[in-house]
Amino acid sequence: MNLVLKTPDEAPYKTGKDFSVLISCEGSTAARTLEILQRLNRNLKHESGRLLYQLWNIDDLAFAELREMGAVEAARSDMIIIGMHAGQELPWRVEAWMKRWLDLRKGRPGALVAVLETAPQQAEILRKIILKLKAAAAAGQMDFFVTGAKVGRDEGMVRGAREVARQFVMAHHKGGTPGGLPAAQRLPAGICGR
């Protein structure tokens, strides 16, 4: 696949051929989220089509117009990567943005990948944020993956984003659920962390 920054001038998305990724992150997690994109690109270099990506700064989601534009783009994406430093709770702007794109997706398959950073003493806060993100993914019938965090029972759910993305895209191109993993390979967010 050819890695292509999605712009208004790009040719339209081709279902079954292209794969789209939206990255929304804070400055402190930008390098790690882009590393996932680079790994994804390396794993898909022999596939045909385009790996379309776009970058959104989480801080921009505080503005209603930008949050709406970002939600529309996220609803169209096959994979959404959220990168942030886990604070006291999930920021309101992220929750509002997620709620909107979940409504717009209408249960369309996809994947939500969380890249979370936090101090070791904030493990309980991190766990609460992971549970909120899992619930959002489950509500949207999306697969959910976490990288960069190990908390209690979630430790077993931490996946290398490279392998997750490779499986997701391979299924997308080889007759799996459009934009999703075949039923036998899916890991519904609702069962994560049990």
Image (tube, rainbow, N blue to C red):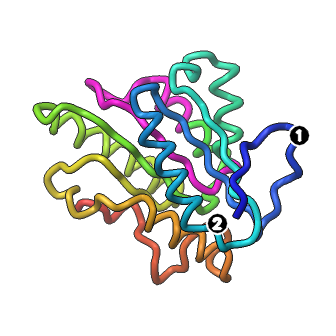
State the mark number for residue 9: 1
**Labels 1 and 2 touching (C-beta < 8 A):** no
Q: Quick one: which residue is furthest to the top in this view?
A: 63
Q: Is residue 65 above or below residue 115?
A: above
- The question of residue 35 being in magenta is answered with no
State the mark number for residue 104: none
Q: Quick one: which residue is furthest to the left in this view?
A: 121
Which residue occupies 63% across, 75% down? 177
- The question of residue 92 being in magenta is answered with yes
Q: Nearer the viewer, residue 188 or 115?
A: 115
Please state the horizontal and vertical placement of residue 12, each as a whole percent of the image: 87, 52
Q: Which residue is mark 2?
A: 179
Disc 1 residue crowd, few under 14, some 14–19, many 20+, Cα 10 Å: few
Q: Nearer the viewer, residue 73 or 39?
A: 39
Residue stretch in magenta:
76-98
Please state the horizontal and vertical placement of residue 58, each as a whole percent of the image: 51, 26
Please state the horizontal and vertical placement of residue 24, each as a whole percent of the image: 54, 35
